[in-house]
Image: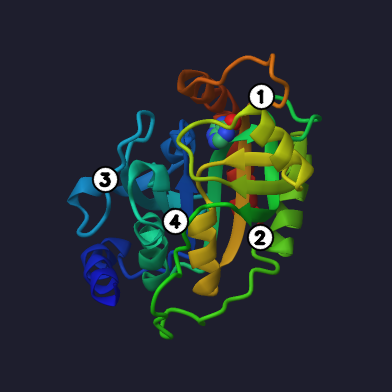
């Protein structure tokens, strides 16, 4: 693992022009719009980066953008990897390891999620305050390399309270109505049954999605500060008669909300 991280880091490091890139930003399904605002110095397809998995989901462009926005140098993953694609949890979170090795200290992660909280509407944004990990595996399972982080990392404050407040204030300045809540990470790829939705809600979930948890766990293991934002692309079928969710539906909703997300991320970057 360390060898792979070092090789990928050695490949990407020259593209940073010797400048500090503190933030790594991960954009999910249909949320790539933010990347269009970046003065990109480099846009590297994942396929040409050593040891990077290749994204297989429609709607994920699959490239690493290195550039500048709001006067900050950033590393942006346009398209991410999912456990349901067949990658291991370690593979899904590998780019976070690389970003940390390149000097990133902050992870800003966005995802598409289904709303469990009855107050949520499709197209809303939710700042993640905490998560519940329901993935059947763990990115830190196996031997721990102490040079990467501790054996038993704390997940208290995994979603930085400082960044949650900063994002909430940024949202207020922009006039966005933002929710805050708990993101439940599940393996997918099937959407939840109505019974599962009721169970996830009853056990404390506000939104449910198939990503983010592995990346945040690895980022916390590596001592990074994390901010997560969910785009509520659909209201989950908590009631048996609700409409079925389709991937096209998810993509369409998330494109509409992508503009709000994009302004929120820019405002957060300005405020950092
Ligand atoms: N469930 C799980 N993941 C999702 C959903 C959902 O309803 N919507 C977008 N990602």
Q: Which of marks 4 and 1 is nearer the N terminus?
A: 4
Residue with the mark numbered 3: 54
Tag 4 secondary structure:
strand
Q: For label 4, count other residues whose C-alpha is less than 10 Å away and answer few (under 14), some (14-19) or many (20+).
A: many
Q: How crowded is mark 1: few (under 14 residues within 10 Å), some or many (20 or more)?
A: many
Against 234, residue 117 (above or below) is below
**Secondary structure state at the residue bearing disc 1:** loop
Q: Does the residue labelled 1 lie within 8 Å of ligand 1?
A: yes
| Mark 1 → mark 2, Cα distance in angstroms | 27 Å
Residue beneath label 2, please?
159
Q: What element carries label 3?
A: loop
The residue positioned 76% from the left and 47% from the top of the image is 204
Mark on residue 237?
A: 1
In front of the other: label 1 or label 3?
A: 1
The image shows residue 236 at horizontal and vertical percentages of 65, 27
Residue linked to disc 4 = 74
- Residue furthest to the front in view is 195
Q: Is residue 72 visible?
A: no
Residue found at x 33% / y 46%: 86
Nearer to us of marks 2 and 4 is 2
- The answer to the question of whether label 3 and label 4 lie on touching residues, with beta carbons closer than 8 A, is no
CB at disc 4 and ligand 1 closer than 8 Å: no
């Amino acid at each position: 693992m360390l060898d792979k991280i070092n090789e990928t880091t050695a490949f990407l490091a020259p593209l940073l022009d010797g400048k500090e890139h503190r933030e790594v930003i991960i954009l999910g399904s249909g949320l790539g719009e933010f990347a269009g605002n970046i003065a990109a110095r480099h846009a590297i397809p994942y396929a040409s980066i050593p040891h990077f998995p290749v994204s297989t989901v429609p709607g994920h462009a699959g490239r690493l953008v290195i550039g500048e926005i709001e006067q900050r140098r950033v590393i942006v993953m346009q398209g991410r990897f999912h456990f349901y694609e067949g990658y291991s949890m370690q593979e899904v979170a590998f780019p976070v390891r690389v970003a940390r090795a390149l000097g990133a200290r902050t992870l800003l992660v966005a995802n598409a999620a289904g709303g469990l909280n009855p107050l949520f509407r499709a197209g809303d944004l939710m700042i993640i305050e905490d998560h519940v990990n329901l993935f059947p595996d763990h990115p830190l399972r196996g031997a721990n390399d102490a040079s990467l982080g501790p054996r038993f990392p704390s997940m208290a404050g995994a979603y930085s309270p400082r960044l949650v407040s900063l994002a909430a204030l940024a949202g207020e300045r922009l006039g966005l109505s933002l929710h805050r809540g708990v993101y439940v990470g599940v393996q997918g790829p099937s959407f939840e049954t109505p019974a599962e939705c009721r169970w996830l809600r009853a056990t404390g979930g506000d939104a449910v999605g198939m990503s983010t948890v592995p990346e945040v766990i690895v980022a916390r293991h590596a001592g990074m500060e994390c901010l997560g934002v969910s785009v509520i692309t659909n209201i989950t079928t908590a009631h048996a008669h609700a409409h079925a969710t389709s991937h096209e539906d998810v993509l369409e909703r998330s494109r509409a909300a992508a503009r709000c997300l994009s302004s929120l991320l820019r405002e957060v970057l300005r405020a950092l």
